[in-house]
Amino acid sequence: MKAPSDRIYKLEKLDTASNHIDWAIKLLLDFDEPAAAVTLAGAAEELVGARLGAGAASRVLSANFAALSGLTRSDVADQHLNKTRNWLKHDRPPATLETALEMDAVIMIVRALSNLAAVDRSMPSEGPRFLAWLSAGRPDLFNFAGQTPSQSSPS
């Protein structure tokens, strides 16, 4: 085992978020570790979302779903949008959680990618591979405005 280093790192928030997204994608696609992917992508989403304020993916989604459901934005966020991420991060009840963990990871990665693109129009290096994987496995998610998946898939 390698000993820890005393090396000092200079970190930038957007670079760190981009790196988190890359690793979340690798953990999901290469190692089948969706729980770790949720937490890393969630951290990236928060890092970048703080710069976007009301335009952050989580805030837009919670506002839209709150308007449609009659729930408060806080309830939408806590009970639905961030339920899995928060359960993974915090030691609080329930002791077990049943969830579609891979889909939770996909959604959290998409939210993080959306925030990053909104801030500086960038895409982390693993982003195109993730989108290609998602398009191949879930072409229905790329069916925009009646287009077929081949017409609307990312280029």
Image (spheres, rainbow, N blue to C red):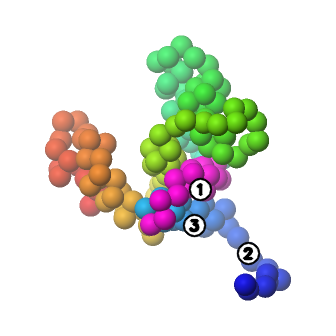
Magenta-colored stretch includes residue 31: yes
Q: Quadrant of the C terminus?
A: bottom left
Can you identify the residue that label 3 sits on?
19
Where is residue 41, by image quadrant?
bottom right
Q: Is residue 95 above or below residue 125?
A: above
User: Of circles 2 and 1, which is in front?
Assistant: 1
Magenta stretch?
Answer: 30-48
Can you identify the residue that label 2 sits on?
10
Can you identify the residue that label 1 sits on?
36
Task: Tell me the SS state at disc 2.
Answer: loop
Where is residue 92, by image quadrant?
top right
Distance in Å between CA atoms under marks 3 and 1: 14 Å
Q: Is residue 95 above or below residue 122?
A: above
Instruction: Give me the residue at 43% from left, 62% from top.
Output: 29
Mark 3 or mark 2: name the one nearer the start of the chain.
2
Judged from this view, the residue extending furthest toward the top is 70
Is residue 100 or residue 126 the one in the foreground? 100
